[in-house]
Amino acid sequence: MTAVADPARTRPAGASPPVRRRTTLDRINPATRLVLAVLLSIPLIITLDWLSASVALLLELVVFSACGFSPLRMVRRLLPLFVVAPLSALSMLLYGQSGGRIWWQWGPIVVSDNSAMLSVALFIRIFALALPAVMLFADIDATRMADGLSQVLRLPSRFVLGSLAGFRMLALFMDDWRSLGQARRARGLGDAGRLRRWAMMSFSLLVLAIRRGSRLATAMEAKGFGGPVQRTWARPSTVGWADVVAVMVSLLIGIAAVGAAWQMGTLWTVWQ
């Protein structure tokens, strides 16, 4: 059997690990990214028509492409949506609010002009809502995010530190799942049914996560995290012109999406 070389071991001594290519988003404060995700989501939540979602998605693709993200990279990060979006659109097509010309009907299933329009709008809207969230938070640094939440948004330290600890532990779940699988196979328990094996490993992972969280909470409490003590910051978190420009661009995207639908007469809000 031919052994596969480990890239980390074959790297020459003293060579630094590969560095992630920086993008324009790296200049934006992580707290501002959270604000951007909210601003980009509001117009898509209050509208139901297909045109506003289409305009928003198109402008988002243009903006993220200008920030240094290739179309292939965006598609890779949205791959799960290519399964979720068609299923959601099909469900809306079959069971959505009927109206206009009836295309086909069978029992509770009614396919009409209205349900077809809602189906197309939902399909586009899923991508328009998910794209900013995925692109803004995929490569974010957890420590910088916590600094921004505490120093810029002034959120309670207990909440921020707990979120940071949980975010850090998410990376351990895959390693824990792999270790649990190896332990079960070593004990001769790996030949059980797939559903039963998945249920047992999920329960074990839940117990492990609860125990780890309890120990972490006790350790953080013992070290005074989240207490009334005024703390200093190792790295200051500030906002600059890049953050202001990003907020303005997100506002313009929302205004353009809603304005285009209103101008073309297709605007449909949730309260109509």
Image: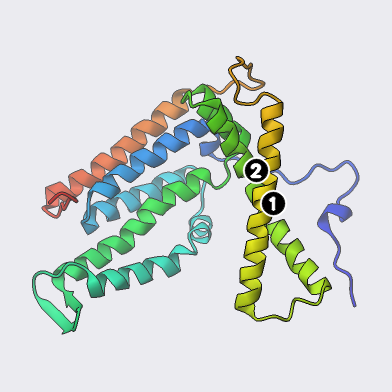
Q: Is residue 9 visible?
A: yes
Q: Position of residue 191 (x, y in %)?
A: 73, 81
Q: Please report the residue visible at 21 percent of the width from the left and 56 percent of the height from the top.
A: 49
Q: Please report the residue visible at 37 percent of the width from the left and 71 percent of the height from the top.
A: 87
Residue located beneath label 2 in the image: 168
Amino acid on which disc 1 is placed? Leu
Question: In screen coordinates, is 71 left or right of 166?
Answer: left
Question: In screen coordinates, is 245 left or right of 266?
Answer: right
Residue 159 to residue 272: above or below: above
Mark 1 to mark 2 CA distance (whole Å): 8 Å
Residue 90 to residue 60: above or below: below
Residue 217 to residue 115: above or below: above
Amino acid on which disc 2 is placed? Arg
The structure's colour scheme is rainbow
Mark 1 crowdedness (10 Å alpha carbons): few <14, some 14-19, many ≥20 = few
Q: Residue 219: which quarter of the image?
A: top right
Q: Position of residue 202 (x, y in %)?
A: 63, 64
Q: Position of residue 128 (x, y in %)?
A: 36, 53
Q: Assign a secondary structure to mark 2.
A: helix
Residue located beneath label 1 in the image: 172
Q: Position of residue 32 (x, y in %)?
A: 45, 32
Choose between 29 and 84: the one closer to the eye.
Answer: 84
Residue 30 to residue 96: above or below: above
Q: Please report the residue visible at 38 percent of the width from the left and 32 percent of the height from the top.
A: 247
Residue 268 disc label: none
Q: Is residue 28 visible?
A: no
Q: Residue furthest left?
A: 100
Mark 2 crowdedness (10 Å alpha carbons): few <14, some 14-19, many ≥20 = few
Q: Are circles 1 and 2 on residues that touch, CB within 8 Å?
A: yes
